[in-house]
Amino acid sequence: MKAKERHELKQNEIAQFARRAMAWLEGNRSRAMTIAVAVLAVVVLVGGYAWWQQRTADQAGALLGMAGAIAQAPIAPAPTVAGATQQTGTFPSEAARLEAALEAYRDVIDGYPDSKAALSARYAIANALLAAGRAAEAEEAFGAVVSAAGPSLQGSLGKLGRGQALAAQGKHEDAIALLTELSADRESRLPLDGILIQLARTSAKAGRTDDARAAFKRIVDEFPASTFAAEARQELARLG
């Protein structure tokens, strides 16, 4: 069949389909209107839900950004002149800044508990508490991250942070058990050398020299270009 004939046949098929469609619409005008209204309602609902989701994400993200700005705000000594107030955007101490940041992060969680911003806020709270030396609170906060994140990158990060918080409290055996489990998790997207260095350091602090040596050796053997490789080699030389 020539190309011209195929083209004419295709046009005829389209024309026939169009005539059948028009005939059906003429005979089913009421039904067609009902279907059109239903389809339009679905489109409006889906579009409205997508808009609401985006608006919620934007609002939660804005609050998260404000909390992050508070956490990074400069420290300025409290004014000593009578009647003077603290300079806007500053805090008189790291403790005061921390409390303000924690409150701001909790506002994100309370206002938008199921958002991605809320998960980031939970992780920021846990890290801030750990950095401030409040390890017991950090352990609980990292546990909240794990519960909220499930089997995801954020969940693995929460487990790693919880291991660090346990070690900071001297709960070395619990920390080692958690880090060992995390190092064996093939689904985890965390860099294995980062997990192994934490495991090695914690094992060394716990006096488990053989375990520490094994973890340091894995870094040297499996990740020779790792940023932790130099430390691992030094520790291996020290441990003998």
Image: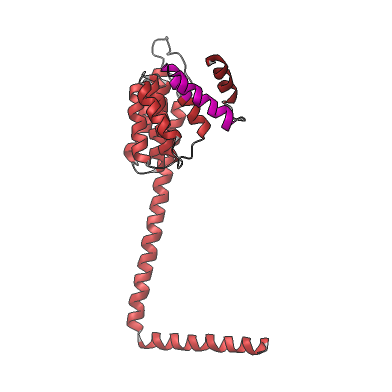
Q: Any magenta on residue 207?
A: yes
Q: Nearer the viewer, residue 4 or 102?
A: 4
Report the colour scheme.
secondary structure
The segment highlighted magenta reads 200-223
* Total numbered labels: 0
Q: Is residue 10 left or right of residue 39?
A: right
Q: Any magenta on residue 216?
A: yes
Q: Is residue 59 above or below residue 197?
A: below
Q: Is residue 226 left or right of residue 138?
A: right
Image coordinates of residue 91 in percent, x first then y, are: 43, 20
Image coordinates of residue 95 in percent, x first then y, are: 39, 18
The residue depicted at 42 percent of the width and 36 percent of the height is 156
Question: Which quadrant would the N terminus be assigned to in this image?
Answer: bottom right
Question: Which quadrant would the C terminus be assigned to in this image?
Answer: top right
Q: Is residue 142 above or below residue 90?
A: below
Q: Nearer the viewer, residue 231 or 78?
A: 231
Q: Nearer the viewer, residue 100 or 79?
A: 100
Image coordinates of residue 236 in percent, x first then y, are: 55, 19
Image coordinates of residue 185 in percent, x first then y, are: 43, 38
Q: Is residue 87 above or below residue 194?
A: above
Q: Quadrant of residue 102?
A: top left
The residue depicted at 32 percent of the width and 82 percent of the height is 30
Q: Nearer the viewer, residue 186 or 68?
A: 186
Q: Quadrant of residue 43?
A: bottom left
Q: Is the magenta region chiefly helix, strand or loop?
A: helix
The residue depicted at 37 percent of the width and 35 percent of the height is 145
Q: Quadrant of residue 98?
A: top left
Q: Is residue 90 visible?
A: no
Q: Is residue 145 visible?
A: yes
